[in-house]
Image: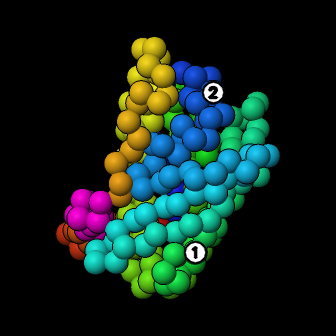
Amino acid sequence: MLITNGFEVEQPVDKVWQFFDNIPQVAACLPGTELTNDLGNDKYNGKVVIRMGPVKLQFAGTAQIKERDNAAKRIVVDASGADEQGRGQAAALLTASLTPTRTGTRIEVSIDLQIAGAAAQYGRGMVSDVTAVLMSDFGANMQRRIDAISRGLRPDQVASAAPASGVRIALRATRMALYRVFRRFFLPYEPSRV
């Protein structure tokens, strides 16, 4: 399933791209993510913990940078892992592209996500909504982290993202789903023009 999302940070594109060079800093912005080992050659071991309703998924796996295009400000990361309790697997090919805007940098993210097991039972809509919530939090955390480092704080002095809380994410994702339903059924019908 292909999931696309985007967000903006109020920092120049070169500063944001420099931030993307430090993968542990980037991972610290994504809720529920922890890098456990730098394997070298842009490859990392890590964990991702996400609560989706009553299910807590804890994936352990690897992520590797497959492409880094400095001129186009584009990075491609290949990640895969398995739930530590054997309830599923996930694989993702993530592409992030940075473009300058009038007030900062626009970050467009596309994730080609393949899931099996417990997470797959939620369906495309819920997984897409949860991903959108996580991307929104990722953008806000990245903004705070870059701002703090710009003020002279060392990376180890800046708090990492909070864990991906099931209740908070579920409520926000549910709100997004309800909005989609509301839009589909209650917005005025506009016949197509021939």
Q: How is the image coloured?
A: rainbow
Residue at position x 45%, y 14% in the image:
152
Instruction: Identify the magenta region.
Output: 165-177
> Looking at the picture, how far across and down is residue 108, in whole percent?
55, 45
Based on the picture, tell me whether residue 174 belongs to the magenta stretch.
yes
Of residues 6 and 67, which is closer to you in this image? 67
Label 2 element class: helix
Label 1 element class: strand
147 vs 184, left or right, is right
Name which residue type carries label 2.
Answer: Gln
The quarter holding residue 46 reads bottom right
Q: Quadrant of the N terminus?
A: bottom right
13 vs 157, left or right, is right
Single out the residue that lies furthest toward the top: 152
Residue at position x 38%, y 36% in the image:
159
Of residues 26 and 5, which is closer to you in this image? 26
> Looking at the picture, how far across and down is residue 98, in whole percent?
60, 36
Mark 1 burial class by Cα count in 10 Å: few <14, some 14-19, many 20+:
many
**Label 2 – label 1 distance at C-alpha:** 30 Å
Disc number lying in front (2 or 1): 1
> Looking at the picture, how far across and down is residue 180, in whole percent?
30, 67
176 vs 108, left or right, is left
Name which residue type carries label 1.
Answer: Ala
Based on the picture, tell me whether residue 55 belongs to the magenta stretch.
no
Residue at position x 53%, y 46% in the image:
27
Magenta span: chief secondary structure: helix
Would you name the residue on which mark 2 appears?
18
Would you name the residue on which mark 1 appears?
82
In primary-sequence order, the first of circles 2 and 1 is 2
Residue at position x 34%, y 48% in the image:
162
